[in-house]
Amino acid sequence: MQNFRWIILTVLALTGIALADPHTLKASRFNGVLYVSVHDIATYYELGANSSGAAGRVSYRSATAQLVAEHDCRDITLNGVTHWLSVPVLDTHGQLWIASLDVLKVLDPVFREGRLPGKIPVRTVMLDPGHGGRDHGAEGAIGREKVLTLDLAKRVQRLLEAAGLKVIPTRTIDENVSLDERVALTNRKNADLFVSLHFNSGGNAQGIETYCVPPAGAASTGNPFRRFFGGGDDKCAANQFDEKNVWLAHCCQRSLLHITGANDRGVRRARYVVIRDVACPAILIESGFLSNPVEEQRLISSDYRDKLAKGIAEGILEYRRTTE
């Protein structure tokens, strides 16, 4: 498995088809994009046989890993968590294919459980309660995002400090802190991780979603129409932590779902300023929808916010355990 990163990086630099021996993968180019067959991915990661009997869909499960993917969908299931890809799964030549960039930047970090080169010990965590002051954020019938994010951050901070981590919040009171100020503080304090806390708004939608930045040139989750590769402007500071970002997001999303039982809206991609420009692995968590009356009742419950805090803290601690 140690040759995998070298193989994928090599094929990304080539055109046509890159052949490999049985212990590596090959990539094929379709419509200008390099893909790896899902069958080869399953073989490489020892996922066993496809148990799906449906056309255009695969379902693999081993004792330690899971992959479910469907033709023309950008969302797939990896080890129990929904992940959004850069481009939809392709169905051609009698099988399904996943873009090489997604294999490298999404599947590999998850299947290897964050055991990546360039490990940095996690000692300091920057917690970022979203909004504040004149910026109220999302509002439900009762709950206000700026109030709930600050409360949630304090709960997470207590749990992380009890586990021996140093925690620095970007705000401790109801005040306005600009996005650039949050980034600058994180970089000035040399934080090892950045976790931004938010609550969502969007009709009757419900569930938890966790964001990290897309790989350079890839589309955000919210933009299904953009081409796979974009211009140089898409590269950002956080791309140097692509694999760590997605593994941190996976750990927190999985832990939150396990503890709360909330709807899984997936690990998604967006170039939000606070996770785009910080000099450390970074994620942004949307812990639920204040616009949904049923979910709002959960979110304004102190007991439920304790569950959210536990899920976030345990996700961060799992990230630290696996990467160290």
Image (spheres, rainbow, N blue to C red):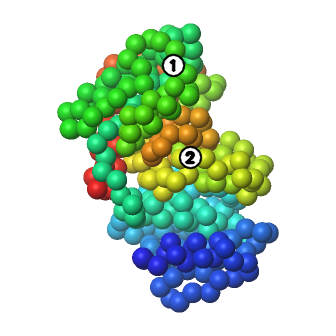
Assign the C terminus to one quadrant of the image: bottom left
Q: Amino acid at mark 2?
A: Ala
Label ID, residue 177: 1
Expressed as whole percent of the image width and height from the top left, the position of residue 218 reads: 67, 54
Structural crowding at the residue carrying mark 2, measured as other residues with C-alpha within 10 Å and reported as few (<14), some (14–19) or many (≥20): some
Residue drawn at x 55%, y 78% is 7
Label ID, residue 283: none
- Residue nearest the observer in this picture, 293 or 215: 215
As helix, strand or loop, the secondary structure at mark 2 comes to: helix
Expressed as whole percent of the image width and height from the top left, the position of residue 285 reads: 48, 35
As helix, strand or loop, the secondary structure at mark 1 comes to: loop
Q: Gap in Å between the C-alphas at discs 2 and 1? A: 21 Å
Expressed as whole percent of the image width and height from the top left, the position of residue 73 reads: 66, 56
Q: Is residue 195 left or right of residue 309?
A: right
Q: Earlier in the sequence, mark 2 or mark 1?
A: 1
Residue 128 visible, this orientation? yes
Q: Is residue 112 left or right of residue 76?
A: left
Label ID, residue 237: 2
Judged from this view, the residue extending furthest toward the bottom is: 21
Residue drawn at x 59%, y 61% is 102
Q: Amino acid at mark 1?
A: Val
